Amino acid sequence: MESPVTTTPPSQPRSRRSRLIGGIIAVLVMAALGALTWYLLHPSEDAASGAGGRRGTPATTVGVATAKKTDIPIMLDALGTVTAAATATVRPQVSGILIKINFSEGQLVKAGQVLAVIDPRPFEMALLQAAGQRQRDEAQLDSARVTLVRYRTLLEQDSIARQEADTQTALVKQLEGTVMTDRAAEGMAKLNLSFTQITAPITGRVGLRVIDLGNLVGSGDTNGIAVITQLSPVDVEFAVPQDRVPELQARIVQNASLTAIALDRTRSKTLETGKFAALDNQVDVQTGTVRAKARFANAGQALFPSQFVNLRLELTVIKDAIMVPVTALRHGSAGDFVYVLNAKERTVALRPVVRGQATIENVEVKSGLKEGEQVITEGADRLKDGSKVTLPGDKPMMAGGGRRRGGAAGPAAASTTAASAMPATGAAVAVPASATEAAPEAAPEAAPASSTLPAAGEGRRQRQKAEQ
């Protein structure tokens, strides 16, 4: 028995109704895309007016600062080197054996303090010898003087020749010179004896010891016994640019007391405060600077010789200066200018100014700006004279002038809904009501929201019933 052959009916062409539905959906999608393009390229008049008068350009968000009147010090910053006010190498002035050391390494000593002692016995003997020679010559001088008195008496009596009296007078003078020499020798012996006690010539800190007990020392030793460095006060040498020398020289002529501040390497800590001391008399042709010196009391020993510090010298103080942040000052072909904010209209005006002295963060405006006016500090690169701006605290506005509403209404939402409703090939698609409500102006011939199209499964069932 042969099994019956089942014949599959050929696929029926899509009905006219399906093609109509697909065309309507395509028209809706194209209309939504066109509305979205128009919205992006042609904003509303309210949005255009909020963009500084240029259509399609949003208002720039800027930062502002208020011009303030304050006193600003004019500073001169330079890199300085701490130098000791005095440095002395302690050397013995006589030769001998070192028998005593009275200081420790790094100790603070005072001028005149005994640091070391040389064996004094040879110098004591030399002193005794000089004293004995002096006494002997003095005795001879006394005897010669007595003889001279007698010769003069006899000469008056015409009992001796005048030559003998003159010879005795010369002998007395000779012995007087000898006695004077003996006294000088005795004084030198006393001085050499005192030199056996080596004293500190200045007040300061003793460095590392370079000699030990028992060594033979003398005045020809290069290193000496120790080096003393004066730490209080100390000087800081720094270089002044030649362009600022006239300004500093003017203050020196006025006998002004200029305050100098020594800062650490990071400029965050003040080490010591002192006064300007001196200015050199010539410019260094290699660096174009003039050497200067400031003196510090250094009571706390914060400064150390040969230490590098940042020196800040206060030249003068400008009273009641109008100051703005450095970022607010702009420079153009016509000179310096700032953007001044009109807070009521939210616009800016370009205003030429004349700059003055500057600090790290602020700059002085000599003319063109008043106290209390607000200037633009951020976002000025995108501004022109009369541009509209918004401040960080302002509420955002939509292109149509109203506040942003919740939901997915608008052309963008319409395009999203319409795109999701694109039909697949050979299938009918149901169009939701929101797709026709999204852009009513863009597609006036669209079907009303209440009309509902059959789903794809329902249309297939209807075709099967018709074939049967």
Image (tube, rainbow, N blue to C red):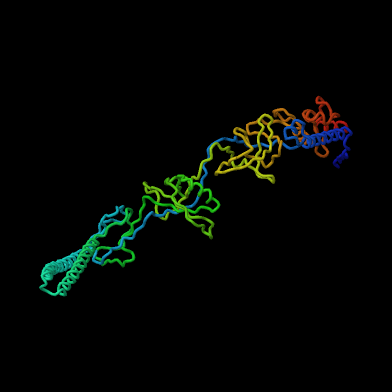
Q: Front-most of 328 and 337?
A: 337
Identify whether 118 is placed above or below 378. below
Residue 207 figure quarter: bottom left
**Residue for point 41% across, 52% down:** 235
Q: Front-most of 410 and 68?
A: 68
Q: Is residue 400 left or right of residue 247?
A: right
User: Residue 249 placed where, x, y %?
Assistant: 50, 49
**Residue for point 86% across, 42% down:** 2
Residue 239 appears in the rendering:
yes
Q: Is residue 359 left or right of residue 405?
A: left
**Residue for point 31% across, 66% down:** 221
Residue 361 figure quarter: top right
Which quadrant is the C terminus positioned in? top right
Identify whether 358 is placed above or below 455. below
User: Residue 171 placed where, x, y %?
Assistant: 17, 71
Q: Is residue 163 left or right of residue 285?
A: left
Identify whether 291 is placed above or below 325. below
User: Residue 224 placed where, x, y %?
Assistant: 31, 63
Q: Is residue 426 left or right of residue 261?
A: right
Q: Front-most of 138 and 56?
A: 138
